[in-house]
Image (cartoon, rainbow, N blue to C red):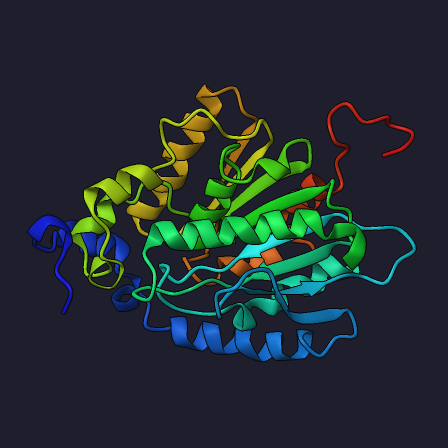
Amino acid sequence: MRSLSAGQAIDQNYESQYNLRVRHPERGQIYTRYAQASELTRQRPEARLDLRFGDKPSSTLDLFVPRSNEAPPLLIFIHGGYWRALDKHGFSFVADAYLESGIAVALPNYTLAPLAGVREIVQEVCSSLSWLVAHGEELGYDAGRIVVSGHSAGGHMAAAAARRGNVPELEGRLLGYVGLSSLFDLAPLLSTSVNLDLGMTHEDAEALRLYGRRDLYQVPMLLASGELETQGFQSQSANFAQFCAGCGLQVENLVIPGRNHFDILTDFAEAGYPLFDKTLALLTRAMPGADPQEA
């Protein structure tokens, strides 16, 4: 078994806040429902599956582009799983309602721990965004209008991609960021059982920490957590929202009534929910400086 960072013992307070496998045994049923819906999504005629963006076995993505005469905006969704579990295949359902609203959706995969460290995984995800920017015209979406989003660990990676130095190709192309039950400070994980798989060090956690960095793209930030989540996850979003506001960014932090860490995706993926509507509004807003008559 891998040891915790620097020989740390498990902190039971952090363990209760971040080890969600124990807290939510019903997550398996939720994931099964998502997988069943995703299987149908993957059969849609708009699906282009397992497009390769890099050399690693995991470096593939799924793309769903609505049939339209005009190149649509692109929503990028990065799945969670604490960098150690899950796969894009189980989250294809996210694309359905956005496709019906004229939005293209991309879901990148990435190497899972312990086959790669978290820093390496973040770099792999950032490379998928660079690839998507480069191939928009070829694949039929507008790479000049992108929203990057993610759930849990995926929300962390999406925010990392929204830093100027990580994906410089997004300059002038990023419309906004959406983080669902996301992590922005990884230090609490160092003394949890999660880190037995991740093997993060204090240096890793500091390098991956998003608080205190002022190189985020100047775009609207939409954060959300569930009312039934742990205080740890709710605080991650609240604290990052406060930091973003202090940087002069437009930011909104939602607490979704009746939702937990896993079923919050329903509000993101189904039309009519405020979280979906707000995400769609980001995707359809005009890029700052654009001619309103051409937007």
Specify the quadrant that holds the C terminus. top right
Front-most of residues 61 and 81: 61
Residue 152 seen anywhere in this rendered image of the structure: no
Q: In this figure, what is the number of numbered marks?
A: 0
- Counting from the top left corner in percent of width and height, residue 177 is at 57, 40
- Counting from the top left corner in percent of width and height, residue 284 is at 76, 41
For this orientation, the residue located farthest to the front is 55
User: In the drawing, does residue 68 fall left or right of residue 167?
Assistant: right
Image point (55%, 60%), residue name? 54
- Counting from the top left corner in percent of width and height, residue 250 is at 57, 26
Image point (37%, 46%), residue name? 183
Front-most of residues 239 and 106: 106
Front-most of residues 182 and 124: 124
In the image, residue 166 sits, relative to residue 15, either above or below, namely above
- Counting from the top left corner in percent of width and height, residue 21 is at 29, 67
User: In the drawing, does residue 51 fall left or right of residue 208?
Assistant: right
Specify the quadrant that holds the N terminus. bottom left
